[in-house]
Amino acid sequence: MGCSKNLVDSEQLMGLLQSKGWQVTHDSPNPEGEVCIVNTCGFIGDAKEESINMILAQGQRKLNGQLKKLIVMGCLSERYLADLEAEIPEVDAWYGKFDWAGVANDYLKDAAPRQDKPAVAEGADAEPAPVQRVLTTPPHYAYVKISEGCDRHCAYCAIPLITGHHRSRPMEQILEEVRQLVACGVKEFQIIAQELTYYGLDLYHRRAIAELIDRMANIPGVLWIRLHYAYPTDFPWELLDVMRRHDNVCKYLDIALQHIADPVLSAMHRHISKDETYALVERIRREVPGIHLRTTLMVGFPGETEEAFQELLEFVRWARFERMGAFAYSEEDGTYGAQHYADDIPDEVKQARLSKLMRVQQRISADVQEAKVGSQMLVMLDRREGDYWVARTEYDSPEVDPEVLIPVQQAPQLEVGCFYQAQIQRADDFDLYANIIQTDIEI
């Protein structure tokens, strides 16, 4: 459940379980296994509810005799362990966010080892470097988590309460993981962290994200690198130089801005002003022409006036974010906001503001996509759905961004995981429709 960082944890656990003899499936539509492990999310109310509903559903399967063991791990159990243990006795074992190795090394340690060897990914060398993780993504792309935790302590966010202080992974360890993934056929890398731009401060006493991405881009076989979850305050400008110099570093940046009105930014503890935010967006666009920015915004934070919300609308119209998500504030236990602010914006006002904000963004997204009609773009093919191949450009992250739809009838011999040159034929509010014009692409 939850974010891509949770997905990486699950993949690591799956690899460890396989090494100990277990046969493991992920999100099976018709689960038949003896043991179910639910990796939970504890970020916001909806995510917590989804995780609890999944636990309850699997608990019922256990009561029905369809499961022998039910194990729960992840952010929700890290944060609410005592309450959950008392409320859901069907669960056999509870593990926190960072205890996933204990599931295999402790609770499931008695599995009989398998004798067969894992299959080699198509296109990989006969003896690829061993990879601990079992990828649950399509084999041509993977998420790489470069750090854990966060030191920012925004007033609305419970993540630091769950994950603790920021902890960077050593650079050589990350680069070796990328090399191993390349050996197994991975071409595209989604670089993730709770706070990407903070990378290196704890280990190297400097912001080292630019050096890390620069070195990663020089690894043979790394064809696309995409950056997620940057923070606007004290942005490392040298990262933009890396983007300009390397064609395989996608002109894409996921940077959550949350709001624009100074009183709201101050109350949120974002440590950045309205003027500084405008200047940040302007400079990023100037230094990396054509970059696509993804951001996340929040409405309904305590004290958000109608005037502040209008500032936010004006900012979105000015910035014209290529990708944008938004959500309404919900009070989270233990956060500064929950302890010090009254949740004083009625739910109906929050939802009305959210709907208005997203309507503005929908028109912007439609304009952005329409401007691409007639252009030629490099796309990577992800899958086939019915009569269409589904692909992405460098400006599209998996799962969250628009896609490029290519009629199978126009190009029946395409291969998933390969790059093609496409001409954009038409667009709707979010997705593009294209024809393939070149298949022998080497990048």
Image (spheres, helix red, strand yellow):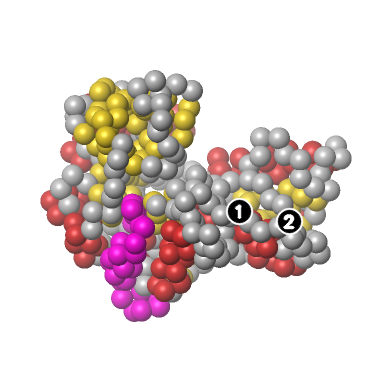
Where residue 286 sits in the image (x, y, percent)? Answer: 13, 51
Quadrant in the rendering for residue 113 = bottom right
Q: Is residue 336 visible?
A: no
Mark 2 Cα within 10 Å, few/some/many (few <14, many 20+)? some
Quadrant for residue 179, please give it.
bottom left
Identify the residue at horizontal 56%, vertical 48% (top origin). Answer: 136
228 sits left or right of 65 in the view = left
Residue 289: image x %, image y %? 15, 48
The front one of 277 and 268 is 277
Q: Secondary structure at mark 1?
A: loop
Give the amino acid at mark 2: Trp
- Pinpoint residue 115: horizontal percent, then vertical percent: 74, 60
**Camera-nearest label, 1 or 2:** 1
Labels 1 and 2: the sequence-earlier one: 2
Q: Which residues are magenta?
A: 201-230
**Residue sticking out furthest to the front:** 126
Residue 206 covered by magenta stretch: yes
Q: Are marks 1 and 2 in contact (CB under 8 Å)?
A: no
Instruction: Spot the residue most to the left.
Output: 286
Q: Residue at x 42, y 37 (%)?
A: 415
Q: Looking at the picture, does residue 32 appear above or below residue 240?
A: above
**Mark 2 highlights which residue?**
22
Quadrant of res 152: bottom left
Looking at the image, which is closer to me, 275 or 144? 144
Residue 228 x %, y %: 37, 53
Q: Residue at x 72, y 52 (%)?
A: 23
Residue assigned mark 1 = 119
Residue 309, above or below 161: above
